[in-house]
Amino acid sequence: ELAKGAKLRLAVRQGFERATRTIVDANITTLITAVVLYAIGTDQVRGFAIMLILGILMCMFTAIFCARLIFDVAIHRNWVSELKMTQILPKTNVDFLGKRYLAGVFSVLLIGVGIGAVVMRGSEILDIDFTGGTSVTIVSSDLLDADSVRKKLAAGAKDVEPDQTVDITVTNVQMSAYEQNSVWKIVTSLETEEKIKSLITQSLEVESYTMTGVRIAADDADSAGGEGSDTGDCQEEESDDESTAPVDEQQVSYLLTFSHAIATSALLGNFESAAETLTMGTPSIVIDPPAGVLDDDHDEKEWLVTIGLSEGDASELVGQVTTQLRDKPVWISANTIGGKVAGKTQETAIAALVASLFGIVIYIWIRFQKIVFGLAAVVALIHDVLITLGAIAVSAWLAPYLGFLLMDEFRISLPVVAAFLTIIGYSLNDTIVVFDRIREVRGRSPDLSSDMVNTSINQTLSRTILTSFTTLLVVLILYTIGGQGIHGFAYALIIGVVAGTYSSIFVASPSLMLMMDWVTKRAEKKKVSRA
């Protein structure tokens, strides 16, 4: 508006009035995918969906109301007399539609390679969320390559399940706390955690816990830990005589140090099983987290444990726990999903994608008053999902060579499906901005020309690149330091953001042009036939 010569006050009013519809459309379509995410997701995915929904609503509120209020107040009080904005790109006049055939060939080749990779990987591309089975992440004592680990496990699987073929997938996990080629994620078709643990302990040299305990005095115990959490069944009886203090049980404190970090719940479980083995009943076990830590159940290498037993019994109990942990392999994570649950998850994931696309088509149809806008947007979204799917499939061959880029052998899991839905929402955001500008440039013209489409893309190009860059920056941070739990999710988002930016220019707009031409020609044929 300022570039057109409008005064500042008028430019702000007209700018917000024209942008409001685009902001609402782009965010509502993203909100559709967020609601679907919440409907199908696990607890972690639902948490992400809730934050996404709240973020969308708050962004709409701040963009439409708060930003307008700030501008109005600043202009009214003469705090701002002019607005200068840095132009990232100079005014462009690129013939994007002229390159649509070259872009089409490029997209077809990428999708073809991706689909081929998906076929070659077969069911191995699916995580246990969709196939059922068990996955564990272990720390190996020997530094082996993936092929050696896989062969050892395959040989051991014949002893664990002699009557059936066990599917085994091995992925190296990069963790800063451990040496390279020492941490492995092992996914198998075995449906019990006990069987996969038996397989791994028989086949591989796995790191186990070592524990050392130092008996400390009561004063030292008070300063070593935090406030403490009583996880035992200790009870105190109230005295009728207020002047008489209750008699404390015997308590012994140990500062325990472990070779590998262990969670509070795991440590408590070992103390309880050790007490049961020694027929000591259920003594009070108080486990203090380190000072300043609020969450009791997290992994630490050092814990302060106070035991409600005599010194001799407490020493015997600690010795039993030490023995138990010596035979306990280090499991960084473990997850088991049954076959029926996996089958239901597949159905839910497919239904979620279809429901999202259907809802988006309906909404865009209503807002733009032509179904071709919705269909063209869905063509671009399917393109983005297929490109991302192909990138996940190809990662199996790239991981051995691109480990320095944190590349893993990624699989399709529920978080990755969540990434697909997020990609749909993000890509649609860019596409709607372009479509809305096409609607403005087209005006009341019944036809859509190449010049109209090119003009619209060029006018929104700077905004598209800026939005994509800032989004990609955040996603790259997630990918590098977000941890193993969301690594696949972040990888899919990186590919999806790039593919979505590309498709909003080279897929969605040409598809709209092609469909509009087809509709126009069909209408003309009907008129001729009626005449």
Image (cartoon, grey):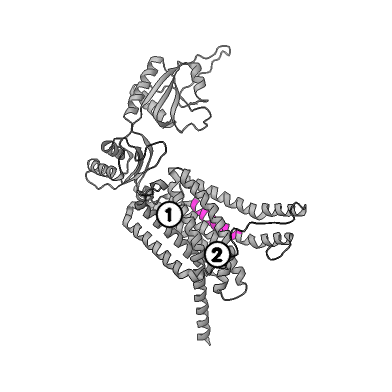
Q: Mark 1 Cα within 10 Å, few/some/many (few <14, many 20+)?
A: many
Say above or below: 330 vs 400. above
Tell me where the magenta segment starts and ends, as one range. Answer: 23-37
Using the image as rendered, state which of residue 416 and residue 143 is in the foreground: 143
Residue 480 in percent (x, y) is at 46, 45
Tell whether position 26 is magenta.
Answer: yes
Q: Quadrant of residue 279?
A: top left
The alpha-carbon separation of the residues under discs 1 and 2 comes to 23 Å
At label 1, which amino acid type do we have? Ala
Residue drawn at (52%, 53%), measured in percent from left and top? 35
**Where, quadrant-wise, is the N terminus in this rendering?**
bottom right
Could one spot residue 371 in this view of the protein? no
Residue drawn at (50%, 46%), measured in percent from left and top? 477
Q: Secondary structure at mark 2?
A: helix
Residue drawn at (39%, 54%), measured in percent from left and top? 392
Disc sitting over residue 364 in the figure: 2
State the predominant SS element of the stretch in magenta.
Answer: helix
Tell whether position 289 is magenta.
Answer: no
Say above or below: 204 vs 473. above
Residue 167 in percent (x, y) is at 29, 48
At label 2, which amino acid type do we have? Ile
Q: Which residue is mark 1?
A: 349
Q: Are marks 1 and 2 in contact (CB under 8 Å)?
A: no
Using the image as rendered, state which of residue 262 and residue 182 is in the foreground: 182
Residue drawn at (51%, 47%), measured in percent from left and top? 48
Could one spot residue 297 in this view of the protein? yes
Q: Residue furthest top?
A: 243
